[in-house]
Image (tube, grey):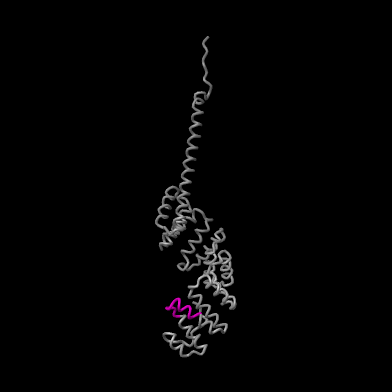
Amino acid sequence: MNFIRHTPTGTKLGRWALPVVLLVLWTGELAAQVSFRTGRERDRALDESIALIRQMEYELAAVRLNECLELDSSFAPAYLQRGRIFLEWGAVKDALADLDRAIALDPGLGEACFYKGYALYGRDTTGMDALLFDRAISNGYTSAWAYYYRGLTRIRDGKDDLAIRDFSEAIDLRNDFPLAYHERAGVKRRLGDLQGALYDYRTAIGYRPDFPQAFHNMGSVRILLGDYQGALSDFSTALDLDSTYVLAWNNRGYARYYTGDLEGRRKISPGPSNPDFPITRQA
């Protein structure tokens, strides 16, 4: 009797099933290894570029960042760091392009929001810089500089009560921050806290003794407090630090007037004198 041999369905395919599965697994493992290796190289390039930026080796840092982006063109931190370098070079348009790319790839990257706000500060009239500083802080970039610059935008926008909070936050994060003390002093003076302003100016000078604007503005506060000799000393120190400081020349002339030194006022204050000059003006 002749028997017809049957080949069970899938037997021939079954002979290849295991090799195919192994090939797929091997290919997937290889891809994962390549991806892991690429990721490590990318992260190493980023770390090296950040170290170079700290050393102000911007050209070398830019080379490493370009290599980083060749490995991964969707790596937001690399665009952020390259944007910082463009800012250092004064290439604001290129910086904004990279920072926009970083934010588009990672909307929660607070540091990129900060640097974009910094790039726009003083150039933008729409208030976008203030919104970006808000966004940077709300996304966790709680840098002293972020609070400082948001404070500046709030002064500009007439929000002194909020500005003073930001400068205080900046000082809490970085105690040796003379610019923050200086700006907070100006807000305190406008709000009528003259003693508080005097304290902040003194503290700013303690951290930065070569700060002519702080000496001048402290002298202006002393005038308001009736301390004309102290004001005269402050204006003189400001001029020792910056002999081209016209406002300090004028206000020292007024301080001499208040101390009764009319002859000194005529000799020391250059140019035409204006009797209505606002002595309380801040530099």
- Image coordinates for residue 195, horizontal then vertical, percent: 59, 77
> As displayed, is residue 273 above or below residue 151?
below
Numbered label tally: 0
Q: Residue at x 57, y 60 (%)?
A: 138
Q: Residue furthest top?
A: 1
Which of the two residues, 21 or 232, is positioned nearer the viewer here?
A: 232
- Image coordinates for residue 230, horizontal then vertical, percent: 54, 82
Q: Residue at x 46, y 55 (%)?
A: 51
- Image coordinates for residue 260, horizontal then vertical, percent: 51, 90
Magenta-tinted stretch: 234-246
- Image coordinates for residue 50, horizontal then vertical, percent: 46, 55
As for residue 32 lying within the magenta part, the answer is no
Task: Give the overall secondary structure of the magenta segment.
Answer: helix
Q: Residue at x 56, y 58 (%)?
A: 140
Which of the two residues, 257 or 158, is positioned nearer the viewer here?
A: 257
Which of the two residues, 127 or 8, is positioned nearer the viewer here?
A: 127
Q: Residue at x 52, y 20 (%)?
A: 7
